[in-house]
Amino acid sequence: MLPHLHLLFWLSLLPFVTGWMGENHFQTMPVDDYGVVLLMCAVAYSILARSLFAHHSENAALAEAIGKDRKGWISIVLYILGIGLSLLHPLLGFGIYICVAIMWLIPDSRIESRLKH
C-alpha cells in the first residue's frame, strides 16, 4: 500500500469517530476507537515520513533534523497509553489525547536551526 494513501485512509476516519464520540457523550467505546484512529494516523505518518526521506535524498537536511522523530515515537506511546486508560475511564484517555495535541503545538527548534544553515 502506498504510504500516503495509508495516512489518508486513517485521516478520513477522524470525522466519523469524532462525531460518534460527541454523540455518545464520551463513552468508553467511542473514546477508545478515537484513540485507535489517532494511533494509526501517527503510525501512518511515521511510515510516510521515513519512506519520503528514503526516496528523496535531496531532503537529507530535513531528515537529519527530524532525526529519530522523538515526538512521533512519544505520540505513539502516549496514544497506546490513552487507549488503555480510556478503558478505565474515558476522560483519562481523552486527556492523554489532548496532551499529545498540545505537545505538537510546541514548535521543534531542531528543524528550524538545521534548515537555516
Image (cartoon, grey):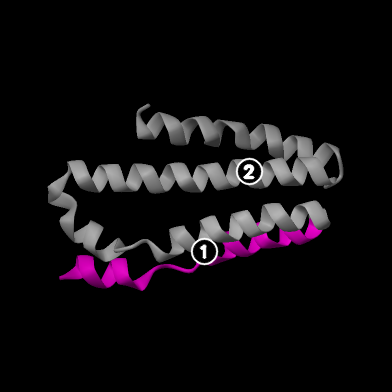
Viewer-nearest of discs 2 and 1: 2
Is residue 5 in the magenta section?
Answer: no
Residue 90 x, y percent position in the rendering: 80, 53
Q: Amino acid at mark 1?
A: Leu
Residue 56 is left or right of residue 103, and the answer is left
Residue 47 x, y percent position in the rendering: 37, 44
Q: Residue at x 52, y 64 (%)?
A: 105
Residue 93 is left or right of residue 7, and the answer is right
Label 2: element kind: helix
Query: Residue placed farthest to the top in the image?
Result: 1
Quadrant of the frame with the N terminus: top left
- Earlier in the chain: of badge 2 and badge 1, it is 2
Q: Is residue 28 above or below residue 117?
A: above
Quadrant in which residue 93 is drawn: bottom right
Mark 2 Cα shell of 10 Å, populated few (<14), some (14-19), many (≥20)? some
Which residue has dot 1 on it? 105
Quadrant in which residue 51 is drawn: top left
Residue 64 x, y percent position in the rendering: 22, 63
Q: Is residue 92 above or below residue 23?
A: below
- 87 vs 30, nearest the viewer: 87
Mark 1 Cα shell of 10 Å, populated few (<14), some (14-19), many (≥20)? few
Q: Are marks 2 and 1 in contact (CB under 8 Å)?
A: no
Q: Amino acid at mark 2?
A: Val
Q: Residue at x 33, y 47 (%)?
A: 49
Q: CA distance from mark 2 to mark 1?
A: 21 Å
Q: Is residue 31 above or below residue 75?
A: above
Magenta range is 91-117
Which residue has dot 2 on it? 36
Q: Residue at x 84, y 37 (%)?
A: 23
Residue 59 is left or right of residue 8, and the answer is left
Quadrant in which residue 69 is drawn: bottom left
